[in-house]
Image: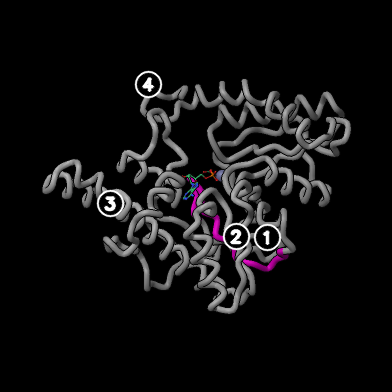
Amino acid sequence: MDHLPYGGVVPELASRAHIRAGLPVIESALEEAGVRLDDLSAIAVTHGPGLIGSLLAGVNLAKGLAFGCGLPLIGIHHLEGHLFSALIDSDLQPPFVALLASGGHTELIHVRKLGHYELLGATLDDAAGEAFDKVAKLLGLLPPGQFVMGGRAVSDIARDGNPQAIRFPRALSGRATYDVSFSGLKTSVLTHVNKLRKQDGPQAVVDATADIAASFEQAVVDVLVDRTVQAVAACNVSHAALVGGVAANRCLRAQLASALENAGARLVVPDVALCTDNAAMIASAGAYRFAQGETDGYDLDAQPRLPLPGLTTSK
Ligand code: KG4
Ligand code: ZN
């Protein structure tokens, strides 16, 4: 609610919230896990990409802990954390294709080996989660002051709707590409809502909300399933992983699993709690980097734009 009067997330307030929450969150996580700082072997922290103030709060806290406890420090790329979320409770091993769909990114990655990533395709405009957030906002589904995590709200209301009610566009489908584009879809939802409101009044929009949400969700799911199935076949892998906040989506989880099964492949998708941003995925990537003997010095920097280490592009 900190951001309520401002109409969007305020970076300055977000970093202050990180500073306030950092130590209490660590304290309660240690207590819940029944471990002490002495039991840890290293401190892993997200050092990019993202909002600089929030990254700085985390990096500086991690440096303080590492220095104070005499532990190695490991900087982790946020997206590598998401990729490693698929390995936490599974026996998944590379090679596999990962669909990483979050609020800031939508990427198809061929994980050839751990630490070796080939970018197959990405969004040309909005990320999948961003499209969900914008549609949640335009359908009036978010409580005042909340600007992110609209995907859950759209998905919840979509349960009562008909996914075939409105045929929203599936951009770039049928083309030889692994890229996706969601900005046209978002505009199409907006145009539909405006037209309905003008023709039949605001109550008509309220009455159609579940159908609009379900039809929008289906359009996103169709596009993501199409690209992932194609990528799995082209890379000749037997497994795919679905990670990132949008991986929490019930329809995407179910429909991608069944499409892959029909194609003779298997989907690994983390528990919902491990899909949206979490510390366990950063710890998982940190444990891997630590086992590789990779640690950082106290000059580790927070980087708002940071390329994924080991990423090559197939384009
Ligand atoms: O990975 P994440 O927690 O944060 C980023 O790195 O961006 O992803 C957050 C995104 C938000 O856009 C949120 O709306 C979306 O994931 N999301 C969902 C669902 N739960 C979260 N999108 C669709 N369906 C969901 N159930
Ligand atoms: Zn994330």
Q: Can I make out residue 127 in this image?
A: no
In this rendered view, identify the residue nearer to me: 97 or 215.
215
| Amino acid type, residue under disc 4 in the picture | Pro
Q: Measure the alpha-carbon separation of dots 4 and 3.
A: 26 Å
Residue 250 pos. (x, y %): 50, 56
Q: Measure the alpha-carbon separation of dots 1 and 2.
A: 8 Å
Circle nearer the N terminus (3, 1):
1
Which residue is disc 2 drawn over? 312
Residue at disc 4, secondary structure: helix
**On the picture, is 217 further left or further right than 307?**
left
Residue 243 pos. (x, y %): 58, 55
Circle nearer the N terminus (3, 2):
3
Q: Measure the alpha-carbon separation of dots 3 and 1.
A: 38 Å
Which residue is disc 1 drawn over? 116
The magenta segment is 92-106
Question: Residue 5 — which label?
Answer: 4
Q: Can I make out residue 34 in this image?
A: yes
Asked whether the residues under the numbered discs 1 and 2 touch, taking CB atoms below 8 Å apart as contact, a structural biologist would say yes
**Residue at screen point 55% across, 31% down:** 52
**Residue at screen point 57% across, 75% down:** 261
Residue at disc 1, secondary structure: strand
Q: Measure the alpha-carbon separation of dots 4 and 2.
A: 42 Å
- Tell me the mark number nearer the camera, choosing from 4 and 2: 4
Q: Is residue 153 magenta?
A: no
Q: Measure the alpha-carbon separation of dots 3 and 2.
A: 35 Å
| Amino acid type, residue under disc 1 in the picture | His
Badge 3, how many Cα within 10 Å: few under 14, some, many 20+? many
Asked whether the residues under the numbered discs 4 and 3 touch, taking CB atoms below 8 Å apart as contact, a structural biologist would say no
Q: Quadrant of residue 98?
A: bottom right
Question: Residue 189 — which label?
Answer: 3
